[in-house]
Image: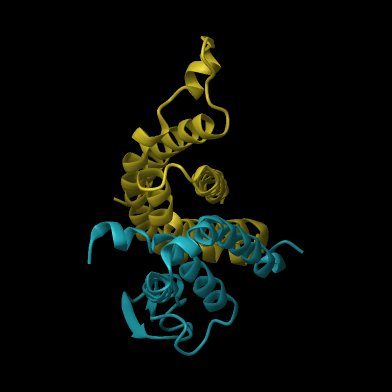
Chain colours: A yellow, B cyan
Amino acid sequence: MNIFLLILHGLCAVALLGALTHQAFSTVWPRKPGETGFVARYRGANGVGYTNAIVVLYILTFVLGGYIYIFYRIEVRPPLEVLGDLPTIGTFEIKEHFLAIALGMLPAYWYFWKRRPENKMARTGTTLLLAFAVWFGFIAGHLVNNVRGLL
Amino acid sequence: MKTETMARAFPAFAVGFTIYYAIAFEYNCCYLPAFTYYPAINEFVPFFATGNDEIGPPMHWYGWMVNAALAGAALAVISLLLPAKATEKAWGVLAWAVPLVGMGAMVYFDRLFFI
């Protein structure tokens, strides 16, 4: 069951990463008229259309992660502590902090996309920070998963 | 209260949440977490508590987030009492700048894992 939830958590994270990265690119590097290449089309996404999906995916991924975190604490972290692998534990600690802070920022992110789209700086700031937290969480989660697999 | 009015308080929520979370982590004690969870025995204890070999490691993360949400909600309510026009620009910056600084602070607080 834990493995199933971990994989589901990972799949939700992939979907979230895809949507958020798409939106971030469309925000900071929007497509210009006449650009037709692959990268331009990637940047040409309508960012506002992703907002609700990102909020839902973030909450879903976070809830799943928050649940399997229990198993990390009692099954994964103790062996890492015995081995003295502090950088891996620290990386995971930072991941949980980043994602908790990003969760608190999520209503503001939604607000600046849906209610105050004219405030481009706030929209860009919340989107980039959210994307950074999710990318960091994704990489840190994989790192810990791989390290645990080596034990 | 109208949904539009409530939504105006969301940036302040982010600020209050981040500040409380960072303080709760750094000074973790007393009433800073709403509760402590013991995953090995699946039990909750109110506020801060330590673990031992019998009951296993404590988890404060969930408790920090609950209280951080309350702190965020409190600041959100206060923000609604301030004049909307005058503060709108400031919240637009603080909503992402405070979480950014908060994330930097968390890296600093966790630096002992890496040195």
Residue A76 place in picture, x, y as percent: 49, 59
Labels in figure, total: 0
Left or right placement of residue A59 versus residue A40 in this view: left
Left or right placement of residue B72 versus residue B3 in this view: right
Left or right placement of residue A87 versus residue A123 in this view: right
Say which quarter of the image contains residue B74: bottom left
Residue B60 place in picture, x, y as percent: 45, 75
Q: Depth check: give the residue in front, B94 or B109.
A: B94
Q: Depth check: give the residue in front, A136 or A90.
A: A136
Residue farthest toward the bottom in the current orientation of the protein: B30
Residue shown at 55% from the left, 48% from the top: A125
Residue farthest toward the left in the current orientation of the protein: B1
- Residue B78 vertical placement versus B105 (above, below): below
Residue A9 place in picture, x, y as percent: 37, 46
Residue A29 place in picture, x, y as percent: 57, 28
Residue shown at 51% from the left, 55% from the top: B92
Residue shown at 42% from the left, 64% from the top: B84
